[in-house]
Amino acid sequence: MSKVISLVAIILLSIGCSEEQQNRLSRLGVSWLEGDYKVTFYEGAHKKEWLVMDGKVTSDPQKGYYYFWVKQAGDKKYIQTPISRTTIEEL
């Protein structure tokens, strides 16, 4: 009986959550690194490197990607790379 009451309480609480609260709950599996990093992506013989200076590299293992912003030729670019083919080194 207590399991049923707990389940009903969880459902009612989740329905009553605002969209922002639901987003926060869904981001619990997301982690990030802040600072200076060299991110390297490997695809066979192809290798691409980016420098993330005083920035943030975010990972979402459930989706399997790293996300970060870099400056290239004066522009900020958003990069997404697969975790399985990417290395991150702290500078």
Image (cartoon, rainbow, N blue to C red):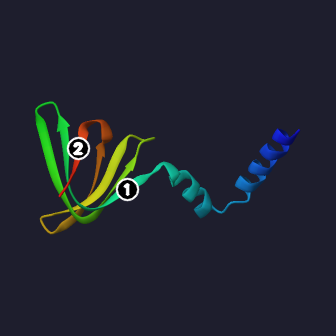
Residue name at image x 18 percent, y 46 percent: 40
Kindly indicate the quadrant of the structure image that contains residue 78. bottom left
Q: Which residue is mark 2?
A: 87
- Where residue 36 appears, as percent x and y from the top left, is 22, 62
How far is mark 2 from mark 1, CA to CA?
A: 14 Å
Q: Quadrant of the C terminus?
A: bottom left
Say if mark 2 contacts mark 1, CB within 8 Å: no
Q: Secondary structure at mark 2?
A: strand
Q: Is residue 32 left or right of residue 73?
A: right
Name the kind of residue labelled 1 in the image.
Trp
Neighbour tally class for label 1: few under 14, some 14-19, many 20 plus, Cα within 10 Å: few
Q: Which residue is mark 1?
A: 32
The front one of 17 and 33 is 33
- Where residue 90 appears, as percent x and y from the top left, is 21, 55
Kindly indicate the quadrant of the structure image that contains residue 45. top left
Residue name at image x 24 percent, y 41 percent: 86
**Mark nearer the N terminus (2 vs 1):** 1
Name the kind of residue labelled 2 in the image.
Thr
- Where residue 83 appears, as percent x and y from the top left, is 31, 41
Residue name at image x 19 percent, y 67 percent: 75
